[in-house]
Amino acid sequence: MPIAGVYIPFGEFVIRYLNFRTLKGFNTSAQGIALRENGIEIAHLNIHHIFLPLRLLKLPMAAFKFYAKNVSVFILLLFPFLQASAQTSFELNQGWKCQKISDVKADGLKISNTDYQIDNWLPATVPGTVLTTLLNNKLVPDPFWGMNNARIKDIFDTGRDYYTYWFVKDFTQAAATGNNQVYLNLRGVNYSCEVYLNGKKVNKQTHFGMFLRQTYNITGLINKTGRNRLAVLVYPPDPVGNANGGQGGDGQIAKNVGLQYTAGWDWIQPMRDRNTGIWDKVTIETTGAVRITDPHVITVVPGVRQVEGKQQPAIIKSSATLTNPTGKAVSGVLQFNIDGQRVVKNVVLKPNSSLEVSLGDLVLNNPKLWWPNGYGKQNLYKSSIQFNIGNKISDKTDVNVGVREIQTSWNEQTKSRQVLVNGQKIFIKGGNWIISDAMLRFSDARYNAEVRFHRDMNLNLIRVWGGALVERPEFYNACDEYGLLVFQDFWISGDANGRWMDPMKKDDQWVRRKYPDDHKLYVQSLIDQIKLVRNHPSLAIWCGGNEITPPEDILLAVRDTILPKLDNTRWFVEYSNSDKMSLNTLGGNGDGPYGIQPDSAFWKVHTFPFNSEIGSVGINDFESLKRFIPTGNLVAPEFYADNKKKSKVDSVWDYHKYIGYDASIEPYGKATDAKDFAAKAQLVNYNQYRALMEGFSNRMWDWYTGVIIWKTQNPWTAMRGQMYDYYLDPNACLYGLHSGSEPLHVMYNPLDGMVTIVNNTFTTRRDLMLSVKTYDMQGKERLITQVFEEIQPQSVKGFIPMKEGIDNLAKKEGVFLSLRLTDVNKNIVSDNLYWLPDEKGVYSGLKKIAPSQLETVAKQTAPGTVEVTLNNPANAPVAFFNRLSLVDAQSGNRLLPVFYSDNYVSVLPGEHKTVTINYDAGKFKNVPVVSINGWNLKEKTVDLANGGK
């Protein structure tokens, strides 16, 4: 197997090298070091790569001569600093400078010369936006705090030059030798740009388009000294749109091929620079004479597969585009490697040409399959595509392969489409995703945390909404790892693109229906972005747009030409609530409802059979609110049901798009302040989302084939539709979903009192003990029934209607209803506790429940892992709705992000529960403490450093 490439950071320089642990040998010469494995040169380390950093550091000549004579010694001394990497490239992600265009008199030819002075320019954040750079230089206030965003100048008022900036980066790259090539790659610039390098213009014409990657062969532009300067002039979108409060502002932002939310929406305020900047990665890549681009790996998994047992073979198809920019024909071998197998093809490339090459099929015996979350493991194979010229690797790219096949079929019962993976139906339980950060501050760690939260909600799909972007490969990596299928919209929305009349829009529907202005650019961008992410097993559905198709010429090109050619293995739905996806016989838009609902409504109301958007509330608790709301504005909303007085909400809450909880707080007692309001809101959050998923699951394959919540996350400090806040602090919505979305789940139908089991798995579950109990406010237990049952795969089964009896028990002051499934080994496989109100719909018993007697013990079982055991003594009341938090011992602030196996947990009398907490131990210096508080438990902390009690 080829050895993975490695980079050694050396100040501003990066030495490309290899991992010595499996190195078979190397040869040195006056030109450098040739590293070989099995007779094939796997890398060549140019002599300039080794000694240029020494010259830059101005080491004594004696030291330089020593290293020149002892190259191998020098590299071996560097071995402890080797860092594994899978690509022959490095990022330009530090040391950038920027300046507003109006403050610069020189042109790009001068600015990109290394002797042009930029010492007084601003430090720039790349990848990032102009607003990010201004914020990091403390030139604007944090737009996510309070009313600060309203105080930042909007580009519509200032003009585009105000946010038009030069970005400059000095970097070290030795000139290529022989036929080696050097490339500059810009993965995303918003919106247009001019590119200069070392006093030369790189792009002959202005680059346009936020979603179109740029690659330039800069081999002939690299300075012989190895010192280089890149200068990029970045222009904002044009037009920028008027952020007038409409969805996408006045809609003009949609004339571009870019983001639409950036002009504002009903869940976000506008980004004042419209996200102008070099917003995605910039890399320098070195290859041999031939470069590999756009690799494509397809897995074919015929038949209906089971999760366990030996598998029939799968077929792997692979291809790649090869580019030969040299003036001579090149002969070589294209090779695909996976699981110890390979397939090869001899290729001849003409001078200055590109060629797409398909390799022969590879049969993978007894494959380890990739399954969505809740159905099986997410097995991934490491594979590579490489091109060898003689005994040298010219280029190599790695691909993580998930062996699976996506299919769809029409369900005649539900009148909607259903998704199949490896031949098995998947009941879709999804969340709508906007973007990770409204200022485009993306990171692998944040992507991983957010997708992990979706895994913890027991969801199996994320829909990437059409007013944002085709998500980054790093997002897809996380979805591959955690088993979240992806429903990927293209960049169209019904609001900005003219589906409805809208007085906030500048243009009428006929004009907006033709957006964007440049259809050719839109199609080019689609092709490019499809190629960017098509190898990810998590990608399941392409969608033409949010609630509307693209214009007809674009739609036909995508549906009939582009996708059949580039990616014909996935479902393409023309728009997110299309009748071809979910037959709408109910009227309306095919989405919703939105906002708070009675819990019973999710069971009673037959909504759209594959509902792409149905949503509700979702504020976090008081600790979260304090992170972005000034103290003076931490005022609870006031709701008046009789309409004699107008309900009131604080101006900052309103600015951050608070959506009303209306009368749902009142049954728990009128909120006394913002802290009390936020705490009671968590009870509502938990019930809303548990009921939502239970109601849809109850009619699985009968009314519904899927549901996607609007929405599960926020890219800024909004106060609606989120299971965790912008700072990655989860709220009770997440854990209500965690319960209601269990693959095997027992639940209570509030309409008829039917106790029901839903089995989302592919396995018949036998010998399940179903127990139904109630507990009064004093903790007294009453066993209603206990019986062994079984349930077939992918089915719903009702067992015992008991509404009249339960209502009688709850009549006076409410009651706790415990539903539990245990297996033959008495292990709990589903545990669901409801708190039911009295006959007036009020939680009168909860208002006077006795204090909890909960005992808490916590211990650190491994670095980054804490185990908390909650013990509730016999004859005690229910220890109700306890929130666990991992807290910094010194500051008292919550550590974020932290992942809990469960939270907002209740413990029945005489029982205990264990919660596992995971966090990044390397990120936090101090030993944390565990904080816990509940409905009937005052907050207390458990010191891990002092016995855990």
Image (cartoon, rainbow, N blue to C red):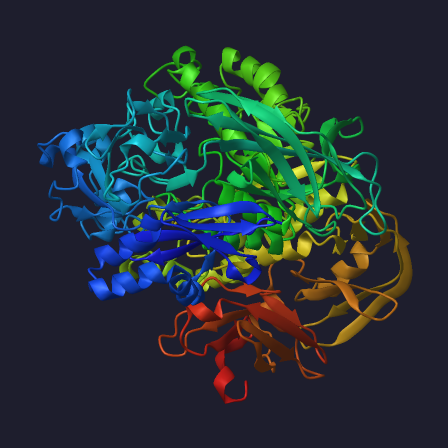
The answer to whether 143 appears left or right of 355 in the picture is left
* Closest to the observer, 179 or 629: 179
Res 721 seen here: no
User: Which residue shows up at 46% across the image and 51% down it?
Assistant: 444
User: Which residue shows up at 50% across the image and 15% down it?
Assistant: 554
Q: Quadrant of residue 331?
A: top right
Q: How many marks?
A: 0
Quarter of the image with the C terminus is: bottom right
**Residue 745, position as x, y percentages in the image:** 75, 55
Is residue 479 placed above or below 893 in the rendered structure? above
**Residue 124, position as x, y percentages in the image:** 24, 47
**Residue 354, position as x, y percentages in the image:** 50, 22
Res 308 seen here: yes
User: Which residue shows up at 56% across the image and 59% down it?
Assistant: 683
* Closest to the observer, 308 or 589: 308
The answer to whether 194 appears left or right of 20 in the picture is left
**Residue 109, position as x, y percentages in the image:** 16, 30
Q: Quadrant of residue 321?
A: top right
The answer to whether 138 appears left or right of 83 in the picture is left
* Closest to the observer, 883 or 287: 287
* Closest to the observer, 183 or 252: 183
The answer to whether 322 appears left or right of 799 in the picture is left
